[in-house]
Amino acid sequence: MDIITSLCKKYTDLSEEEIDIIKGMTFCLQPLANLEDADIFVDCPARDGDAIVVAEAKPQGVPSSYKKSVVGLLAKQENEPAVARTFRLGVATKQMKAVTQESTNVIQSVEPIKNKDRVIGVLIREKRVDDERDVGERIHFSQQGYEKFADALSRMVEEDGWLTEYIDEALIMVNYKGIVSFRNTLAKDLYKELGYVDDILGMPYENVVLHGSELNSSDKDSNYSAVEVSIGKHYLNVKQISLKKNDISFAVVIRDMTPIREKEKELILKSVAIKEMHHRVKNNLQTIASLLRLQVRRSGNEETKMVLGESMNRILSIATTHELLAQGGVDQVKIGEVIVNIKNNTVRYFASPHFNITISLEGDDFHVDSDIATSVALIINELLQNSLQYAFQEKETGTVRIIVTHGELYSQIEVIDNGSGFDVENVKQNRLGLSIVSTLVKDKLRGNFTIESSSEGTIVTFNFKNQIMNTRLA
C-alpha cells in the first residue's frame, strides 16, 4: 500500500475515489516546488479536526524551510490558520503567517482540492518569512524562464490538468490542427470579457488569436516568443511556447497587465501634478523675493537693507529646493543637490568681492523628502550666511567644510569654518539666524543642534531623522 493511501485510510474519512484524486494531484508537486522556489504540500482533513500531511516537495534551487520530511505529521489548527480556514470555508487563503513543524516562520498560500462540493484536501505553498520578496498571491508561470515554463506545462498536459486552475494566468493549448484543445477558466472568462460570445474551446486558434502578426505562432524554429498587446481597455502580456507533446503543438499564456499599466498611468499623472505644484510654489516664492529686492533697492537704511537681504535669501533657498523637486517630478531630492544650490546662492549674495572663500561639500549623498529638504536648505543657508558675514571679518581667505553623514535612523550634517570664532552663549541668544536653525532642527527635523567655537573656528552639528512621519487627519 502506498504512503498516501496508507495515511488517508489511517487518519481521514476519504473514500477510495477521493484518495485516487489526491494521488493523481501529487505528480506535479516537484516541478511546481522548483518553479516557485517554495515548499509544496498536500494536506488532507484528519478525523480529529487537524490536517495530515500526505505529500510534499522541496525546492531544489533554494533552501527548504524543512530539514526533515513532514509527510505523516499532523498540522495543528493553531499553527496553520490558513489551512484550517480553507478546510472550514472551502475557499483559497492567501499570504498568511504560519509556524512549521520545525518552528520556522513561513508565509502560506492555500488552495482547496475538491471532489464536487466537498473539500478533500489542500494544496499549500510555503516560503520563509525572511525570503519573502513581493510574493504574488497565486502562481505566475509566465514570469518564469523557458526551461521551467516548458517543463511545468508539459507535465500539465501529461497528467495534471487540475493545476491549470491554480495559476493566475489564462492558459490555452492548441493542437497540431490549430484547434484550441484546452483552456482554463481564466482564459474562458478573459475572452468573455473581451467580447467573445462563445467558449473558445474547439475553435480554430487563428480565429481567437490576440496578438495578430506581432507574434508568429507558426514559427517552427522558435520555441518561445512574447509580446504585449492592447485590446480595448486591456493590456495583455501574451507568451507562446512550443510543446510538441500529446498532440499539443504549443501553449499560450496570457497575463492581464491592465492593473499594472493603470497604476503606471496614475504614477505619471501624479508625477506631473507634483512637478506643477513645486513649480508654482517656486514661482510664488521668487515673486516674493523680487518684491523684497525692490524694497532693498528703495531703502536708504543699511540695517534695513541687510535684514531684507537675509529674508530674501531665506525665501530663495526654499524656492531653489522646490525647483529641484519640480525637475524630478517626485517628492524627493538628493541632499547634495540641495546643499550645492544653497551654497552657490549664499556665496553670490553674501561673499565680499575681495574675499577668497572655499566651501567644500563632503561625505554621503542620499534622497530626502521635500519637508526635510526645505528645512535643511534653510539651515545651511543660515549657517553659511553667518560664516560669510561674521567669521572672516579680519581675514582675506577662509574655508568652510560641509560634511554629510548618512545613518540608518538619523543623519548628520557638520558645518565647519576656520574663522575667528565667537561667544556661543551670547550670540545664540541675540542672533536671529541661529534661533531659526535651532527651531528648525528641533521642531521640523526632530533632531539635535550643537555649536562649538574657539579662536580656531566654529563647528556646528545637527542631525535629523531620515524619515519624518507626519500625522494627518483623513
Image: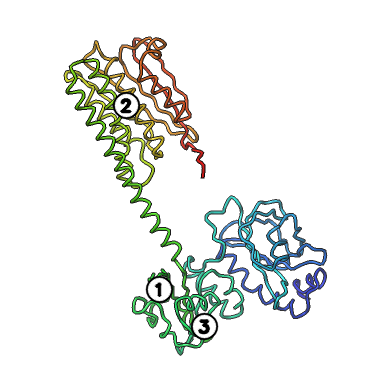
* Residue sitting nearer the eye, 201 or 459: 201
Could you give the CA–CA distance between mark 1 and mark 2, rounded to whole angstroms?
57 Å
Could you give the CA–CA distance between mark 1 and mark 3, rounded to whole angstroms?
18 Å
Residue 362, horizontal then vertical, whole percent: 34, 30
Could you give the CA–CA distance between mark 2 and mark 3, rounded to whole angstroms?
72 Å
Q: Are marks 1 and 3 in contact (CB under 8 Å)?
A: no
Q: Quadrant of residue 54?
A: bottom right
Q: Quadrant of the N terminus?
A: bottom right
Within 10 Å of disc 1 (Cα), the crowding (few <14, some 14-19, many 20+) is some
> Which residue is pictured at 64% across the width and 66% down the height?
92
Residue 430, horizontal then vertical, whole percent: 37, 13
Disc nearest the viewer among 1 and 2: 2
Looking at the image, is mark 2 or mark 3 earlier in the sequence?
3
Q: Which residue is mark 1?
A: 225
Secondary structure of the residue carrying tag 2 is helix
Q: Which residue is mark 3?
A: 245
Q: Which residue is mark 2?
A: 381
> Which residue is pictured at 38% across the width and 79% down the height?
221
Q: Is residue 17 above or below residue 121?
A: below
* Residue sitting nearer the eye, 32 or 107: 107
Disc nearest the viewer among 2 and 3: 2
Q: How many numbered marks appear?
A: 3
Q: Is residue 378 above or below residue 183?
A: above
Residue 152, horizontal then vertical, whole percent: 55, 72
| Amino acid type of the residue that numbered disc 2 sits on in the rendered structure | Asn
